[in-house]
Amino acid sequence: MEEGAEDLRQRKKQNCTETDKMAPDEKNKENPNLGRSPKYVLFQRFAKLFFGCVAAVTSGMMYAVYLSTYHERKFWFSSRQELEREITFQGDSAIYYSFYKELLKAPSFERGVYELTHNNKTVSLRTINAVQQMTLYPELIASVLYQASGSEEVIEPVYFYIGIVFGLQGIYMAALFVTSWVMSGTWLAGMLTVAWFIINRTDTTRIDYSIPLRENWALPYFACQIAALTGYLKNNINSSAERFCYLLVSASTYTFMMMWEYSHYLLFVQAVSLFLLDSFALVQTDKVHEVYKIYLFSLFLAYLLQFENPALLVSPLLSLVAALMLSKCLQMNMKKGTFISRMLKIMYFYLVFTITVTMNFLLKTFVPHKENEHVLKFLEVKFGLNTTKNFTVNWLLCQESLQTPSQDFFLRLTQSSLLPFYILVLIICLSSVTQVIFRRISGEPLKEKITLDDGRIGERPEIAYHVIHTVLMGSLAMILEGMKYLWTPYMCMLAAFGVCSPELWMTLFKWLRLRAVHPILLALILSMAVPSIIGFSLWKEYFPRIMTELSELQEFYDSDTVELVMWVKRQAPVAAVFAGSPQLMGMIKLCTGWMVTSLPLYNDVDLLQRNENIYQIYSKRSAEDIYKILTSYKATYLIIEDSICNEVGPVKGCRVKDLLDIANGHVVCDEGDSYAYSKYGRFCHEIKMNYSPYVNYFTRVYWNRSYFVYKINTVISFQS
């Protein structure tokens, strides 16, 4: 018995020794980094970060060079004269660039800023604060950089201006690269994001059509803010990286708010996403409330630096954030999953909604501001709640950017394979996030550390945030086509992250209960193989098209407009005031500097009313009526555009003259058919006939194939 017991003790010692020897080997298999020195692991992480940053910066620089090259090929920019270059800036873009020119011509920067804030040389009979009303901070910054850097002797002002915008687009691209990289953990996602963005450039950016647009200046900062917020919301982020992300979120949020007048609406959508994220306990509450504080600080600082802009005080963002901060105490008792806490959650949503609406109503009551009634009317008509004959509202409804997306938009995204993969990724992530929400409601706590084997991608707070945000942005894009320029880049980033993320594939395999092949191994293989196949197919199909696009020289030369501008500069007196369509007036202001009666800006009630009144030159009104309208704005010259007068619109009822006939009651409907009726002919046609009474009020002084210029008589000469 003693010998048997002794043998048993020796066997146990032997087994324990073998187990101790085998344990390190098994641990090393589970985590290869444990068997390596700390210096090697640190070097590996540094190399990954360094080369990833190099790839992101390189992608941004190449995209900026691509835009510059394409712009040169499209407009022959370097071979044009200054006037011909300026004509390429159309509509509101022309206005923004004209103020940049004025700043450079001013004797000093301070004097230039003063003239813009007390501007009475742009719109007749009005003194406006152009910096506040038109958000001219990009032009202020560009002019300061141009003069402070001594670029006057090196580069022309127009090249410096568009160069900054193209550079910002490079930052935009790099930020999208970094966001998808941070979410997926691989550079491959960033490269795929860049490829999809460029291929779908028609639907991701308007840089091709209007370089100085506010969104081209602002969206790069918004992309940087989203990239920093993605890192900030992560659970396993160290304190130094968290602090850096917090500072970047703060700086980019404020800059974004200063660059675009509509930025606070986008931040409102983001705040709603964070509110839902926090309400379902998918993220650390303290982090969300820190972002709320950033919103408040940015709003306060922007309000002061934008000359106490009342639009920021009555913005829904301020009301929502204030309501969330006030409701913070109640939210603390809602994290347990009991029946009472579920009822409190419903009450919490109701409380936040009520406080937000009430506070916004009170602010609009006590804060003096110009209510944009046309926006409210537009929304009512857009959603079928009302009908109207108002010219401005119907004109807005006819704008392509404010209509619902066309089928061509979805067809283009499908052909580039973006839409199918985006839908796949969104369904998986949204389903996983929904599962996590139900677990939280039932009281199940979230795991502190999620491994690849768990297959719970929805428990990552940054993923949940992006899912909610992209659903909200997509819903808006389904209503307004102009929102696609915000949503489509998001689609590129999210789809690229999903197909390159092993966690997403592992989540799918967990649902499918895949057992034939090792799921982790298959997830790793697919996260490399699928994006590689997509990238190769995109390169094979679209790379030759892009190269052809860059090699082709496109013809852009509007001789009629050039001749018109040259006549104005040579023949019109300095005190002349021109009247015409807002788009043409923007170009006249830029190329000649002469005063105009209206501008292509749609955020001011008075300017909108002016636009409608000036557009009456294309209606069926008498010569006397048009004369009274033009002289009330001190106009001395009238420009008739043949393209508007003889317009053949693609959408029935959306031509300017049709909208005017409806607003003026010159359309009679009989048994479903519409008939135009007025005792006067269409003014733009009748004035060309040169007979009384039109020649009594107007004298034609210049014409070509596209434009007819008339001098408005100061002394009416009645002729038979």
Image (cartoon, helix red, strand yellow):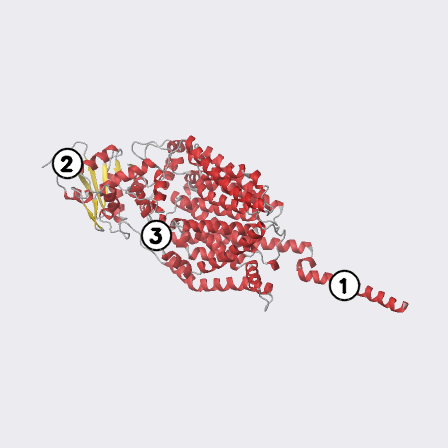
Instruction: Pinpoint residue 99: horizontal percent, then vertical percent.
Output: 37, 38
Residue drawn at 57 percent across, 66 percent down: 514
Label 3: few (<14), some (14–19) or many (≥20) C-alpha neighbours in 10 Å: some
| Amino acid at circle 3 | Trp
| C-alpha separation, residue under disc 2 versus residue under disc 1 | 109 Å
User: With respect to residue 514, does 441 lie above or below?
Assistant: above
Q: How many marks?
A: 3
For disc 2, the neighbor class at 10 Å (few under 14, some 14 to 19, many from 20) is: some
Rounded to the nearest whole Å, what is the CA distance between mark 2 and mark 3? Answer: 44 Å
Q: Nearer the viewer, residue 42 or 371?
A: 371
Residue of label 2: 696
Query: Which residue is the site of mark 3?
Result: 76
SS at circle 1: helix
Task: Please state the horizontal and vertical placement of residue 686, each as a whole percent of the image.
Answer: 16, 43
Q: Are marks 2 and 1 in contact (CB under 8 Å)?
A: no
- The amino acid beneath tag 2 is Asn
| Image side of residue 439 versus residue 577, left or right | right
Q: Which mark is residue 19?
A: 1
**Around disc 1, counting alpha carbons within 10 Å, would you say few (fewer than 14), some (14 to 19), or many (20 or more)?**
few
Query: Quick check: can you spot residue 372?
Result: yes
